Image (cartoon, rainbow, N blue to C red):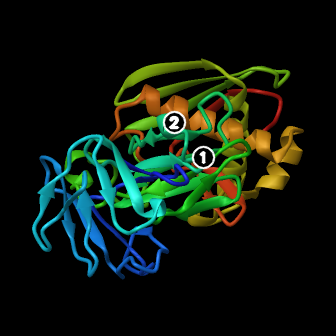
């Protein structure tokens, strides 16, 4: 990702594929407040080979002290100084010239080394060991999943966990979908390609999971989060036995699920993320597309995977 750093306050900005600097907030990705700066002062773009800049101002833009010709695109060299006004607040240093990429940029802009380039399948935050949120690409959109639900991410949105905050940087004109076929709308019917097989001990203390994918068994071992999944599976099974319609089966409030498991809601959220992470790593992308756990307005349920439960002390 290309980065400009301000000479005065050391703040950094990640360049979008077409990036405008100026006073007009409605059209400029980086807003400059100096009175001698034009509404749209200069623009930087990625031409799929290199970064280049063009002056569009009344008072001019300089590159390493040389005034840029108005309206003519000029290549940007690494380490160059770009001035878009009189004061130091209008001077920027070209710190990086990597190609644009959708990413999370740390709110502490001095920590540019902590930029997270996003994997379209999964990005557990702050990390996979204690996940609190997940950013992923689905049906042509970037989504943020957290304890309160799922929301659409737009360019510039802030993504927060208990320990960190990032700005979401969207580079949406780089044909991501043509390079990364992430998901297509799922049919309502359950997929026969993947089945979840739970084994629960009689004392309910141990739960293992085998995933049968296209006739091949993939053992996922014994994990604490498998008991969270089997609890959701039992709720869905009970609703099915009661004749509840498939679209309404298995939904449970996160607080109620926490009470059933005897843990805090935040811990349940971590278990859900860990379960999803394990399944994504165990299956090919096209088989792991349906969400393992679905969310809706503070409620969750097991996704549309067929399952079997063996053992356990709780009758279905």
The residue located at (68%, 22%) in the rendering is 223
Query: Residue 29: percent from the left, percent from the top?
Result: 40, 68
Residue 251, visible in the rendered structure: no
Q: Nearer the viewer, residue 179 or 6?
A: 6
Q: Earlier in the sequence, mark 2 or mark 1?
A: 1
Left or right: residue 85 compared with residue 97: right
Q: Quadrant of residue 199?
A: top right
The mark total stands at 2
Which numbered disc, 2 or 1, marks the residue closer to the eye? 1
Secondary structure under tag 2 reads helix
Q: Position of residue 308 (x, y in %)?
A: 59, 34
Q: Are marks 2 and 1 in contact (CB under 8 Å)?
A: yes
Q: Nearer the viewer, residue 277 or 252?
A: 277
- Residue at 25%, 61% (x, y): give it: 62
Cα–Cα span, label 2 and label 1? 9 Å
Residue 204 or residue 121, whichever sits in front: 121
* Front residue of 189 and 137: 137
Q: Residues within 10 Å of mark 1 (few under 14, many from 20)?
A: some
Q: Which quadrant: the N terminus? A: top left
Counting from the top left corner in percent of width and height, residue 49 is at 12, 47
Residue at which label 1 appears? 108
From this view, report whether residue 139 is shown above or below residue 165.
below
User: Which residue is denoted by mark 2 in the rendering?
Assistant: 114
Q: What residue is drawn where x is 52% and y is 54%?
A: 8
Q: Quadrant of residue 209?
A: top right
């Amino acid at each position: 990702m290309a980065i400009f750093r301000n000479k005065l306050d050391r703040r950094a900005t990640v360049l979008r594929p077409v990036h405008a600097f100026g006073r007009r907030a409605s059209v400029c990705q980086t807003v400059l407040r100096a009175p001698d700066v034009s509404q749209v002062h200069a623009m930087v773009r990625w031409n799929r080979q290199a970064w280049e800049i063009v002056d569009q101002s009344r008072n001019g833009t300089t590159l390493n002290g040389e005034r840029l010709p108005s309206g003519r695109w000029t290549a940007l060299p690494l380490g160059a100084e770009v001035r878009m006004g009189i004061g130091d607040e209008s001077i920027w240093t070209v710190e990086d010239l990597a190609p644009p990429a959708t990413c999370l940029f740390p709110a502490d802009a001095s920590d540019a080394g902590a930029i997270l380039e996003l994997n379209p399948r999964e990005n557990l935050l702050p990390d996979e060991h204690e996940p609190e949120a997940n950013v992923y690409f689905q049906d042509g959109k970037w989504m943020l999943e957290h304890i309160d639900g799922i929301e659409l991410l737009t360019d510039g949105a802030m993504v927060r966990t208990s320990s960190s905050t990032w700005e979401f940087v969207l580079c949406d004109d780089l044909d991501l979908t043509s390079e990364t076929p992430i998901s297509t709308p799922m049919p309502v019917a359950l997929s026969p390609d993947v089945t979840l097989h739970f084994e629960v001990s009689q004392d309910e203390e141990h739960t293992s999971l085998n995933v049968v994918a296209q006739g091949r068994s993939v053992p996922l071992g014994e994990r604490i989060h498998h008991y969270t999944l089997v609890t959701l599976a039992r709720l869905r099974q009970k609703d099915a036995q009661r004749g509840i319609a498939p679209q309404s089966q298995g939904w449970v409030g996160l607080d109620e699920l926490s009470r059933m498991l005897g843990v805090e809601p935040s811990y349940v959220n971590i278990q859900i993320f860990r379960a999803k992470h394990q399944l994504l790593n165990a299956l090919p992308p096209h088989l792991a597309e349906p969400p393992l756990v679905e969310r809706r307005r503070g409620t969750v349920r097991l996704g549309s995977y067929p399952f079997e439960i063996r053992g356990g002390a709780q009758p279905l």
